[in-house]
Structures are given as structure tokens and as C-alpha cells.
Image (cartoon, helix red, strand yellow):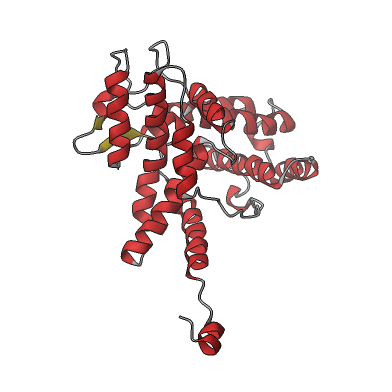
Amino acid sequence: MELQEIFENFMSAKRLAGLADKSLYNYDLFIHSFVNFIGSQTSLSDLTQERVNRYISMLYDKPISRATLATYIRNLKVFLRWIEKKYGLSFSAREIVIPRTPKKLLRIYSDDEIVLIFKTIKVESPWLTARNKAIVSVMLDSGLRQNEVCTIKRCDISLADRMVKVFGKGSKERIVPLGSLSAHYIQDYLNLCPYDSIRLFVSRTGKELTCNAVKHMMFSIQRKLPFEFSSHKLRHNFATNYCIDQYEKTGQIDIYKLMLLMGHEDIETTRVYLHHANQIIVSKMNISHLDKVFFGEN
């Protein structure tokens, strides 16, 4: 079996697994680089660790960031581990090391900045303004991904119970709560929307809302703000604030509950937010034992 056929089988398997278009696009982009380097007609028996290492060495020599390098190798590892499980390999794909990338402290919006975001959301049409506020509030309130917001159906949401059914990566279903303000913005949007559609959020022409349309909307809001703004940052803010709020209320953080709310498959992905939340919690404490000793401050 040749590498090109194996790659096509891999992509078919991922499509059948219900992966999002963005995930499929990334697999196609990053793994195709490997297939082209090794040779599409290379047989499975000729796919050796030495040839894989040569490809990885080539990546290290490319003028790309550490994060991009890690993304290439992470996707390669997923592909090779799939081959190993499906067809077998002469080496262990588990031994491939994904380079570490510097951890950046995720900035969360202040209360004043959140108020400014909603004040900024205003377009020529009242119903589109209501729609945009509803989308931003749902993302900030429940941590939904772009594609998850776009695929919510009207029947998936209960404003009375303040709950929404979400279909995440791999079409996995989960239930996430909504705050009263998000429910208010959604109801306001439903009252003004001129279209009766299956999907909750629609375009200005009444068609299904696409991820590109949401990106364009986010970019329009970003241009009016003095700080960075995107749907991904809204998701970061939800997760980090969830950890901080839960700690302030109970003195502990339920990382597994956050994992379910975020729709993560790997707990390590969720731990990133726990790490950043802990840093913010510690910075707020501002505890100095020396100040207590010399100045009597608590």
C-alpha cells in the first residue's frame, strides 16, 4: 500500500468520525507536507523512522515559529499513530517528541472592557445588532466554538431552563448553561429576526450562518476596540473566568466539569486554563509575609 492511499484512507476515516471542517482542513494541510516530502508512492514497508526523522529535521530548519513547528509535528504524530494502529509500523510513533512552546499568560477582559465590547456591537440593522450581541454573549458566557454557535438549532435551546444543546468536535453532544443576560439577548434577537429558520443564528439574507461570517463580524468589532478581540479569546475568557469564579465561591476548581463544558477530549487541554487562572488568583492575593511582620498588614 502506498502512502497516498493510506493518507486518503486516514482522511476518510476522520470524515466518517464527524470531525469539523477546520480539523479536516488542518490535517490535509499539515500531513500533506509530510506525504509530499516522503513521496506519495512510497510503500508502507519503506516508511522508516529514519525517513520520518529527516522530515522532522527539515521542519526544524524551516523559518517557522516554535508553535507552527509543534503543530506540524503534532499532526504528523496523529497520522503515524493511526497508521501504526491500522496497518502497523516498523517503529513506535509514540516516541516522536512534540517540541514545547512558550506558555503565554492568557489575558482576560476586565469588567469595563466587557461592557465596552457590548456597547461597541452596533450595526445598521436592529435585528443584526441583536444577533451579534447574542452570539458574543453566548461565546463569552458558555465558551462555545465558532462552528458550535453556527450549528445551534432553535430546537436545541431552552430559554426557560437557560440551557443549550451543543454538537462539538466529532458531533459529540453536550449541554451547556446560559446566563440570564445571554437568554435576554437571544430572546431579543428572536423577537426582531425577520426569518423563521431551523438554525438559531442566520445571515442577513436568512441563510445558515457560516464561520467565515462570524469571523468577519468579530473583525468588525475588533476594529472599534482598543484591545485584541476574537471568538477564540471569548472562549479563553469563559474558561479562565469559570476557574476564578468557582475558586472564589467554593475555594476549589472542578477541572473535570470545565472539561465537559468546553467539549475537550483531553484533560491536559483544559489544564491550560487552570494554570492561567491560578496565576491570576495568586496575583490578586498579593500576600507578603514581610509586610505582615514589619507593618502589621494582613
Residue 277 in the figure: left or right of residue 65? left
Residue 174 visible from this viewpoint:
no
Residue 233 in the figure: left or right of residue 189? right
Residue 204 picture quarter: top left
- Work out whether residue 206 or residue 64 is closer to the camera in this orientation and state it: 206
| Residue farthest left in this picture | 160
Residue 95 in the figure: left or right of residue 142? right
- Work out whether residue 222 or residue 231 is closer to the camera in this orientation and state it: 222
Q: How many marks?
A: 0
| Residue farthest bottom in this picture | 293
- Quadrant where the C terminus is found in the figure: bottom left
Residue 213 image position (x, y, % from top left):
50, 21
Residue 138 in the image: above or below residue 50: above
- Quadrant where the N terminus is found in the figure: top right
Residue 197 picture quarter: top left
- Work out whether residue 124 or residue 48 is closer to the camera in this orientation and state it: 124
- Work out whether residue 284 or residue 226 is closer to the camera in this orientation and state it: 226
Q: Which residue corresponds to the image point at 49% horizontal and 65% vertical from the top-left?
A: 284
Residue 148 in the image: above or below residue 260: above
Residue 122 in the image: above or below residue 173: above
Q: Which residue corresponds to the image point at 31% horizontal and 29% vertical from the top-left?
A: 186
Residue 153 image position (x, y, % from top left):
30, 24
Residue 60 visible from this viewpoint:
yes
Residue 12 image position (x, y, % from top left):
49, 25
Residue 130 picture quarter: top left
Q: Which residue corresponds to the image point at 57% horizontal and 36% vertical from the top-left?
A: 225
